[in-house]
Amino acid sequence: MRNGGIMNEPGVHDPENVRSLFDEMAKTYGYVHLFSSLGFAYFWRKACARQIPRESLQVLDVMSGSGECVTHLIPWLGAATKIQMVDFSASMCAAAQRNLNRWKNPNVEVLNGDALSLPFRDDGFDAVTSTFGLKTLSMDQLAQFARELYRVVRPGGVVSLLEFSIPDRPYLIPFFRFYVKHYVPFLGRIFLGNPDNYRMLWKYTVGFGDCSTAMPAFRAAGFKLELRRYFFGSATHLVGWK
Ligand SMILES: C[S@@+](CC[C@H](N)C(=O)[O-])C[C@H]1O[C@@H](n2cnc3c(N)ncnc32)[C@H](O)[C@@H]1O
């Protein structure tokens, strides 16, 4: 099922292409994601956020989209924690900024920046989260991302990373394929998005496989790792300690 070939397909991981894909999807992404995940992603993101120790004072959510993970971090961590969000899509950042106005939490900040070259000092964060962004990175980009996270997290700090994955039970794969390849683009059409953009998410998911793909990069960067699987491997959660 896993088609590692996509990881090397020309242009697919080109930052300009990925950015414009998410710029285009920004208006519909929240709705499509909500309906497409049938509620599962809500609980998976919550699990990802709850991996962060509550006493953390500086937290980064990277590839933050319009703040889908931050909505879980805010109630978990409380108003004393400074949360910084980074995404390279200006439209996603604009959507996050609108959510920020709604959350009315002055300790949350949205930054338009690159996950592979983070605009932060070394050892500055107690923890980092990232949900559903890993799949768009190539192997080289994953290695760079892992090094960047290792650089910005303080010793003893934690990274909590979540991604959709190819289920580990073969009998579930046809359902999963139908779901991501047809149902998600169908929702994209209903919400006036471009179904081809949502089909692209399927390609990234197949190419990525699951979070074990990212483990060598994060281990090489220096993290101690633990991999968790949710709902027969439909999502995987990588937790790393520096
Ligand atoms: C699938 S969305 C995930 C959004 C959100 N975290 C969630 O839980 O739904 C992936 C996000 O990663 C961002 N992204 C991808 N590569 C990036 C990079 N190199 N630097 C910053 N953001 C990036 C995209 O713009 C997009 O908003």
Image: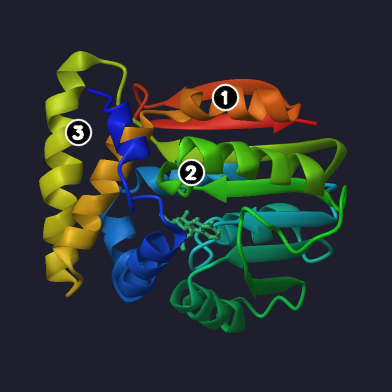
Tell me: residue 28, above or below residue 160: below
Residue 167 in view: yes
Tell me: residue 38, above or below residue 166: below
In front: 111, or 168? 111
Which element type, helix, strand or loop, lies under badge 3?
Answer: helix
Give the amino acid type for the residue marked by disc 2 in the picture: Leu
Which element type, helix, strand or loop, lies under badge 2?
Answer: helix
Which residue carries the number 2 mark? Answer: 134
Residue 126 is left or right of residue 165, and the answer is right
Residue at 71 percent across and 46 percent down: it is 148
Residue at 60 percent across and 84 percent down: it is 101
Crowd class of label 3 (few under 14; some 14 to 19; many from 20; radius 10 Å) = some
Tell me: residue 126, above or below residue 20: above
Residue 139, x across and y down, in percent: 49, 35
Which element type, helix, strand or loop, lies under badge 1?
Answer: helix
Task: Give the mark, 3 or 1, whose residue is nearer the N terminus.
Answer: 3
Q: Quote the CA–CA distance across marks 3 and 2.
A: 19 Å
Residue at 76 percent across and 26 percent down: it is 222
Disc 3 vs disc 1: Cβ atoms closer than 8 Å?
no
Residue 170 is left or right of residue 10, and the answer is left
Task: Give the mark, 3 or 2, whose residue is nearer the N terminus.
Answer: 2
Give the amino acid type for the residue marked by disc 1 in the picture: Met
Q: Quote the CA–CA distance across marks 1 and 2.
A: 12 Å
Residue 123 is left or right of residue 131, and the answer is right
Give the amino acid type for the residue marked by disc 3 in the picture: Phe
Quadrant of the image containing the C terminus: top right
Residue 52 in view: no
Which residue carries the number 3 mark? Answer: 176
Which labelled disc corresponds to residue 215?
Answer: 1
